[in-house]
Image (cartoon, grey):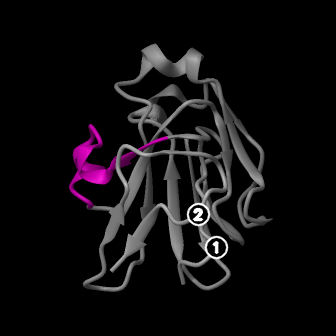
Amino acid sequence: MFKNFGAPLDGRLVDLRQVPDEVFAGKIMGDGFAIDPVNGEVVSPLNGTVTSFMADTRHAVGITSDEGLEVLIHIGIDTVKLAGDGFVGLVGQNEKVLAGQPLLKVDLERIRDKVPSLVSPIVFTNLPAGRAVYVQAGRTIRRGEQGFFDIR
């Protein structure tokens, strides 16, 4: 279920509980991790289908893997309020995607001063009950890199 999951962003890993948003930090949407991005290139972490993409705001994308894992990639905090300013969507709803395929381009410099944080949660919305994500917080990762978290 979690094989071949690559990082969707370049940046520093952040424990989800440290995300400056109570919905994500409280794991209300699910468990996961976050990345403090160093650039705005966002790629698919796995093979699957785009099952949630807000074409008007482009701040988040949900993908269901070929094995049924649901992952939400949410760029920054309160970025929905930007109404798409600074975001370019590269995929559409129900589109098949491959691991490493570009999903979004974000102009981080353009949005940096307009939102509370650029820290970007990556959440598994359908983890089996009793399972939790353990991430190597503080580590710097690159898009496509694997093996930086564990689910137990």
Compared across the picture, whether 150 is left or right of 42 comes to left
Q: Residue at x 27, y 37 (%)?
A: 20
Q: Which mark is residue 146?
A: 2
Q: Is residue 40 magenta?
A: no
In the depicted view, which residue is nearer to us: 93 or 118?
A: 118
* Residue 21 covered by magenta stretch: yes
Please report the bounds of the magenta region as a residue range.
12-27
Q: Could you tell me the amino acid type at mark 1?
A: Asn
Type of amino acid at the residue the image marks with label 2: Gln
Query: How many callouts does the rendering have?
Result: 2
Badge 2 crowding class, 10 Å Cα cut-off, few under 14, some 14 to 19, many 20 or more, is: some
Q: Are marks 2 and 1 in contact (CB under 8 Å)?
A: yes
What residue do we see at 52% from left, 66% from top? 147
Q: Quadrant for the C terminus, please.
A: bottom left
Q: Is residue 84 above or below residue 134?
A: above
Residue 114: x %, y % from top left: 44, 17
Q: Is residue 31 visible?
A: no
First of labels 2, 1 by sequence position: 1
Residue at (73, 67) in percent of width and height: 94
Q: Which residue is mark 1?
A: 4
Would residue 80 appear left or right of 65 to someone viewing this image? left
Q: State whether residue 73 appears in this view.
A: yes
